[in-house]
């Protein structure tokens, strides 16, 4: 049994970590922290957890938590995360950080899109935790930077195309749509039910902070610099991201060969479901699960490929992937504790 | 490993059975049937199941299915169910029937609210499968009649009150609200997204078929005939039933004593969560799980008690409870395969 | 043209007043106030208003506003309202106050359920503005207290029954359900999309502040003190209240006679639609309109009547009714500016 | 008063026509037809219309209807429309057809994407009714082909760019999202509440029938053949289309100049709201209104422009635009009967 702490338990990602870890057969949760709910039982904060987990929220005390926990998930906002991650590492914990703080390898890029970085030396050490694109380095990492929700959905959609140079990446357009839990649990007017319900909008057009993360991954896959248009939208659903990606084909390839290419690429990846020809993803079919569904269509008229991927932003886009990374780091079967079947309807 | 067949797999209840059984460590699904999708793989019908279950739908062939399956869940509409249940029993299968066909002990009542019954002799044998109100008879039953979704939510809300004669049951009012999956997956105009979304209405007022079932259970608890007003409403959510029950107190009792009474009544029932004082249920907190949450308030001004219960109509109100019944029938731990934590948000 | 000011324009009720007043042929909006958005154009605050209204929000300056406006709608929270209403009256404006501050005639009741009242002398003068239950006093009022959303839905459902003594009011149960706009536009965790969506709960059970208002109106109709159980619930829709009311019949009456009684009672009330036998209200069918739909069923088994009413909480439950009151006060046709057809779907 | 018939009143577009026409001061509705509800009062079919319109649905009898009606809206499915439109024209009616049957000028293109055309001779006469891109021909038309919902949203988003050759149209990508009312009111499993709610998917990728209509309009604006990738998605809202359009700039132009270009282009178009810099459309802000909101961002990093437009698919995307066309044809002010303010929230 690995002893695990969840730092930042009062957000939706924190809750999702607890929901999944509570059922993980090799995990014991020893600490959960929340400044806002310090002293309160987590099952009062989130009544869904009643009868499942009965732990009190604490303030973050790195020394105290490290004394019992071996493994730490930091589910804090960026900037706040880098204030505690180095401490946990120094106390011998292994960490999966779910914030953006250790995802970008180039500190200059980080500081351009976010703010000054207080532990840039860890950027080199941190391993970007997208298992399907590289498990080996995750296995031995001390610090894994858990990918963003949008970047996960985009990377899994496009990886086979970029690695096999099937597309002209200068034509790449990524149109993504996310459910409202992606905006977190902070009390903001823009996140109110009446503001989101029956609505739909684009936001942060041309300036969303996940853009450099997406480009870093795609560039690495392509072996050269990739620049994309990434446009996020807000969906009136609680969970789910669907990314629709467009690119011109750089070589003639038919649907069948491409299908084979995708299936081969993901043949060892239990959590990526390459849909059969004629089928496309729906966020409803991955809800609550760690699956990423991928499907595509070649438009002969325009010689473009349209790839669509769907994930649950709180699972494969956050907590589920974090646990997948933990499993890899601990040498456990990758799907341990992550076998939940999507909840439909 | 028990070999299980799901009869009627193309509705939401059938899907939910498959979702839950797929993860049940003691179960192997051997057959799933659907007239509509005969020959089609269930993961094409419900893409949420891709990578989880890969079985083809068949037509119902009692002899063939009974040859391999030991245990059968019939998730068919009432009337259709009684056409196949006797056959499965005759072939030696044990059956949990999720239809209304074997829930009412009095054939006259059944025939008044539904239609003629073709196997009334089984009504005496069939055991009403609400485990929290009587596990013993379920254990040895050949045929369990799985309770309706509304009746489950109402019975669990009121059982302690009726058994302890705390209320004047002649004043009982039950105001229930159900998510749209309760109406099934049939293509009807009234069930279209645009008809249900942003709407809310009462329906079948004074004549809903779950009324006699509710009264049967409440009467049995009270030890005398109970007649209720039961009013169902349609909620614009996919899953969930919330029942708000009103009755005049027949004796002076305070909130604390009543809290104790409820907690004692359900002390051995893992799936009933009696909420702490000051807390009331929300369907959002039981979604996807087998929990029934119960809370109440005594209104001193009117000397009435208001009890509120919440369940997921597809789980505790159907598939989850059916599996709970199976576990009991097979001598397995009652919560086997049912430990899923509610999916919130 | 009457010159109108909207005090408190940044909430959903303020927005709805502006939406409706903008189309009112006899109204010119001269001022709108909002502390939060002071100086900002209302069409930036609410982009739905772009091209319709172009006014800047101001701070509340009673003297300045009264200098141009003849008529004032105060759409402020209770307690805040009574700080400005007397001033507007003193400056010669007529006022429809949409808060709770002048609804209760008995200051002791107000102070028990709310807080100390700073202008109790106005309680006697203020006229409760439910036109269908008394237009005459509204006509000449200087100050109209616009009814609460729940009380409107309940009073219109029950008025014919109480006035004709058809029910035993000691058995009255009112189970109401409201859309999320009823909670206002304040940034609270409990009002976030992810907290409300796919959820449903009762709240303020036994202690909601609309209870004494409901009882005041029902008592006045019955000619004796009426005490009710009123239980509000939160619906995952933006707009709409549905109230389901239960009472025992105190005399034998059939559906047809009751239908006639309702139709006669409301024969001059354009905004109350008594539904034909066999039909019941749905909040979806009144959305955006000033209609109150009423339908009922007599349950012969229990000798109870179940009356259901539906309104749009922001229109007939707030802004629409306020304008209806203004029309009456100004001697305009009651439906002036309120002819919008419900938006379905 | 113009005497108007609505052919095909039982769909959502038919209902929306009635909702709007009922308030149009120059219109009298004389006939509404519905095969499905023949003989039924429309206010029973759609209870939202109770108290507003009281007409019985009839079967389509061209001669009879033409005897009283001067103006006809055909809100029928494609193929069905062309069976009746020529008849109404022959009987002297002017017609706005809301189907796809007369939108494409090239019969070969129509027959490639739809089916054989039975009145191809009318394709030359029919005027494509997008008023903002050409009112003159609409004014005198006998038959106006009302644009599709998606094509309206796309054309209004892109018209200024194409007419001014600001973009390289070979790079055009159109990613559109529509509410569920776009799929009509037919009882289909895929349109059920539980299938759409909490879901989001792309559909008809590379083969949606609105593609040639979009290309026809864009080509006409560009003065040369334009081919686009058009990808529709299904949003879990009742109303609204949001189109996100991407293209590479073919000349250097800054946000301010482009803002001016858009504002100038639409300066006489009351129903197109060009949003101020920094603001982007949301379907929630046009709901129930005839507005098309347009906003854009230039992404300097990629030299692409992202234009976003939002309409209510049932109003500007169907019934509202049809009435706008009628107003033009009859020489009425274009906004007559269409002044409804968007319903938010």
Image (tube, coloured by chain):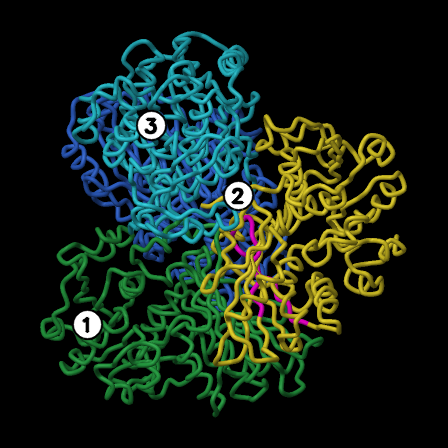
Chain colours: A cyan, B yellow, C green, D blue
The answer to whether residue C273 is magenta is: no
Of helix, strand and loop, which one carries label 3?
Answer: helix
Mark 1 sits on what residue?
Answer: C3
Can you see residue D203? no
Of helix, strand and loop, which one carries label 2?
Answer: loop
Mark 3 sits on what residue?
Answer: D220
Height in image: A144 above or below C146? above
Residue A140, quarter of picture: top left
Chain ID at mark 1: C
Eye-nearest disc, 2 or 1: 2
- Circle 3 residues within 10 Å: few <14, some 14–19, many ≥20: some
Which region of the structure is painted magenta? B228-245
Describe residue A162's horizontal placement relative to residue C283 as left or right: left
Describe residue D110's horizontal placement relative to residue C85 as left or right: right
Residue C249 placed where, x, y %? Answer: 63, 83
Mark 2 sits on what residue?
Answer: B341
Describe residue C183's horizontal placement relative to residue B39 as left or right: left
Can you see residue D94? yes
């Amino acid at each position: 049994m690995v002893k695990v702490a969840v730092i930042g338990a009062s957000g939706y990602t924190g809750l999702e970590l607890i929901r999944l870890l509570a059922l993980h057969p090799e995990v014991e949760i020893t600490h959960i922290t929340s400044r806002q709910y310090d002293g309160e039982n987590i099952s009062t904060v989130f009544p869904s957890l009643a009868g499942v987990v009965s732990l009190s929220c604490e303030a973050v005390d790195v020394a105290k938590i490290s004394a019992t926990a071996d493994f730490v998930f930091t589910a804090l906002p960026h900037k706040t995360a880098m204030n505690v991650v180095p401490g946990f590492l120094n106390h011998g914990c292994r960490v999966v950080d779910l914030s953006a703080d250790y995802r970008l390898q180039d500190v200059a890029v980080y500081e351009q899109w976010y703010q000054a970085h207080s532990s840039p030396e860890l950027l080199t050490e941190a391993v970007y935790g997208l298992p399907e694109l590289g498990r080996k380095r995750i296995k031995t990492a001390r610090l894994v930077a858990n990918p963003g929700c949008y970047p996960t959905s985009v990377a899994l959609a496009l990886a086979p195309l970029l690695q096999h140079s099937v597309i002209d990446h200068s034509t790449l357009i990524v149109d993504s749509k996310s459910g409202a839990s992606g905006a977190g649990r902070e009390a903001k007017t823009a996140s109110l039910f009446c503001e989101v319900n029956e609505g739909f909008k684009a936001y942060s057009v041309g300036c969303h902070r996940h853009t450099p993360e997406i480009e870093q991954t795609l560039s690495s896959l392509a072996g050269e610099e990739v620049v994309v248009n990434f446009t996020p939208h807000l969906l009136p659903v609680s969970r789910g991201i669907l990314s629709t990606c467009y690119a011109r084909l750089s070589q003639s390839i038919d649907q069948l060969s491409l299908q084979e290419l995708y299936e081969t690429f993901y043949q060892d990846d239990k959590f990526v479901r390459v849909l059969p020809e004629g089928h496309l993803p729906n966020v409803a079919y991955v809800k609550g699960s760690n699956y990423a569904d991928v499907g595509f269509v070649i438009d002969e008229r325009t010689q473009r490929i349209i790839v669509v991927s769907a994930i649950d932003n709180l699972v494969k886009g956050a907590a589920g992937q974090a646990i997948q990374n933990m499993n890899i780091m601990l040498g456990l079967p990758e799907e341990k504790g992550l076998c939940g079947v999507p909840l439909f309807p």
